[in-house]
Amino acid sequence: MKQQPSFSIILAVHDQASDISTNLPLLLTQQYDGTYQVIVVDQKSSDETTDVLDALKAEHPLLYTTFLPHYHFQSNPRRMALTIGVKAAAGHWTIFADISKPVPGESWLQELSACCSDHTDLLLGYISTKDGSVQLQTYDSIGQASAVISRAERWRAGVGGNRWMHRLQKSTAYDFIVVKTNLAHQLLRLFAVNTLGHTTKL
């Protein structure tokens, strides 16, 4: 029997206690035949995020939490938070997810694992807001996906130029990324846009 891939699910959160309470339990109770961990990096939240995470950690040993140091807030805190998460990743594959967008079910990870192969470096996932179905776009290399990822990250950072460009960037925005962990830092270089629209030095 083929061994199931191991995953590290990384989430960067900020003042999202409600989303964490609602959506994180489903990530922590996936019906998956392989091993996985969930890493949450708190970007110095001022709400009840810490309390909610502490309560979930007491129930779910696969949850690991850490925080973004204050000195990383000047440029791109989301990218820096994800970078910290990658340093703690033990899985062969890393998933960058969004806590505000719930995964479609408890078998999400099991179904996702079928698309992870030696010949694929990256998958972009899109979750339908109508029926929760998932569409995956696979790439043999990060370079193949660089234009799509750069546009989506500029939209997330609020950098859009004219209205047409903003619509284009939003239309390419994925809900999660799956990447081989040894390529995760390379991928995060594409996130190097700060909130002023300037490229962040790496």
Image (cartoon, rainbow, N blue to C red):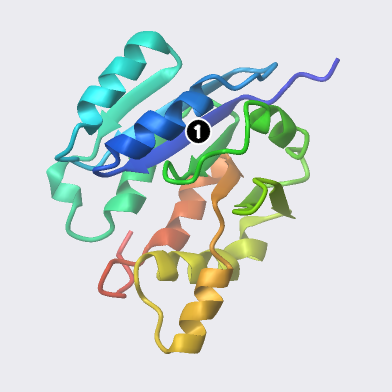
Q: Residue at x 51, y 74 (%)?
A: 169
Residue placed farthest to the front in the image? Answer: 130
In the visual, does 133 lie left or right of 78?
Answer: right
Above or below, 156 relative to 69: below
* Residue 105 drawn at (x, y percent): 63, 32
Point out residue 45 in the picture as x, y percentages from the top left corner: 19, 40
The residue labelled by disc 1 is 9
User: How many numbered marks have been drawn onto this rendered protein structure?
Assistant: 1
Q: Is residue 124 left or right of residue 86?
A: right
Q: Is residue 89 visible?
A: yes
- Given the image, on which type of amino acid does mark 1 rest? Ile
Q: Nearer the viewer, residue 184 or 17?
A: 17
Q: Residues within 10 Å of mark 1 (few under 14, many from 20)?
A: many
Q: Residue at x 55, y 45 (%)?
A: 183
At a point 52% along the width and 30% down the height, the residue shown is 8
Q: Nearer the viewer, residue 175 or 186?
A: 175
State which quarter of the image contains the C terminus.
bottom left
Residue 9 drawn at (x, y percent): 50, 33
Residue 69 vs 197, above or below: the answer is above
Q: Is residue 187 above or below residue 12?
A: below
- Occupied quadrant, residue 99: top left
Front-lying residue, 181 or 37: 37
Is residue 181 at all visible to an observer of this figure? no
Residue 37 image position (x, y, % from top left): 49, 23
Could you tell me which residue is drawn at 46 percent across and 24 percent down? 25
In the rendered image of this protein, does residue 48 appear above or below residue 125? above
